[in-house]
Image (cartoon, helix red, strand yellow):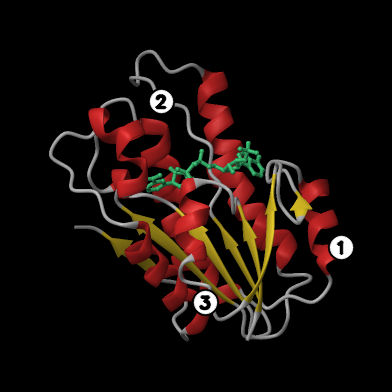
Amino acid sequence: MKTVILIGANGKMGQAALTGLSKHKVITAGRSGCDYTVDITSVESLRNLFKEVGHFDAVVNTVGVCEYASFTEMTEKQWMTTILSKMMGQINIVRIGQEYIADNGSFTLITGILNIKPIPFAIADATTSGAIDTFVQCVAHEMPRGIRVNSINPTVLEEAWDVYGEMMPGFQPVPGSLVGKAFERSVDGFINGQVLYVDA
Ligand SMILES: NC(=O)c1ccc[n+]([C@@H]2O[C@H](COP(=O)([O-])OP(=O)(O)OC[C@H]3O[C@@H](n4cnc5c(N)ncnc54)[C@H](OP(=O)(O)O)[C@@H]3O)[C@@H](O)[C@H]2O)c1
């Protein structure tokens, strides 16, 4: 049994990840309603989280706030909101977290299929997902103490189809429990520097 910090546990992707972590001690973290409060866009907040938890073997992050607009309409502020959460927030989870995580620990980050299957209005989500997929593939070579880093790149969840379905004609949603298997493979396996696609 590992001690796993699950960031964004109350969100739809957090609940999907939770289905794959049943054999572990899961410590939940998020902006509200969790064991620990954290804001992934704040380095200080992340450092406090890792210090306060103490010993942990894995971090699973399912937070990445994205703004949606057409490229010509999207403002710099909307770009920065997405970049500071889905890209820098996740990079900082690994950058700060690697100082505190146990030897041979793992980080699992969230991206999303729209960087390889583009749709209108999702340019910021797609761009930052692509950045994080590249980040995990490259940073894996630099991690100390046997620490692993992977990303989960799922298509839309069945549980979120009512929110995103209209913007995603022709996509087939997948159940959260299937995406949970990818989180399980990242946390419990030995894979490193991989993007785990979950598509229908
Ligand atoms: N849903 C899907 O079908 C799907 C598919 C592929 C990829 N993804 C990706 O998965 C990620 C999460 O999506 P979701 O559907 O789970 O969203 P969600 O249901 O809206 O949940 C997001 C969670 O993140 C928390 N949160 C937001 N900003 C935070 C911050 N700065 N620090 C800490 N926690 C924060 C929220 O907490 P509060 O409610 O307290 O603010 C909420 O619990 C996104 O990047 C999305 O692109 C989602």
Q: Give SS at disc 2.
A: loop
Badge nearest the viewer, 2 or 1: 1
Q: Percent position (x, y) of residue 105?
A: 64, 79
Which label number is shown at residue 68?
A: 2
Q: Is residue 160 left or right of residue 80?
A: left
**Residue drawn at (57%, 20%) of the image:** 77
Q: Earlier in the sequence, mark 2 or mark 1?
A: 1
- Identity of the residue furthest to the left in this view: 170
Gap between marks 3 and 1, in whole Å? 21 Å
Sort mark 1 into few (<14), some (14-19) or many (20+) by Cα contacts within 10 Å.
few
Quadrant into which the C terminus falls = bottom left
- Report which quarter residue 7 is drawn in: bottom right
Q: Which residue lies under the disc numbered 1?
A: 52
Pick the residue in front: 142 or 153.
153
**Residue drawn at (63%, 47%) of the image:** 89
Q: Which amino acid type is shown beneath numbered disc 1?
A: Glu
Q: Percent position (x, y) of residue 128?
A: 45, 43
Q: Is residue 161 above or below residue 67?
A: below
Q: Give SS at disc 1.
A: helix
Which label number is shown at residue 43?
A: none
Q: Is residue 32 above or below residue 50?
A: above
Q: Give SS at disc 3.
A: helix
Q: Is residue 43 left or right of residue 73?
A: right
Q: Which amino acid type is shown beneath numbered disc 3?
A: Val
Q: Which residue lies under the disc numbered 3?
A: 187
Is residue 156 shown to the viewer in this render? no
Asked whether disc 3 touches disc 1, contact meaning CB atoms under 8 Å apart, the reply is no
Q: Percent position (x, y) of residue 159?
A: 36, 46
Asked whether disc 3 touches disc 2, contact meaning CB atoms under 8 Å apart, the reply is no
Q: Earlier in the sequence, mark 3 or mark 1?
A: 1
Quadrant into which the N terminus falls = bottom right
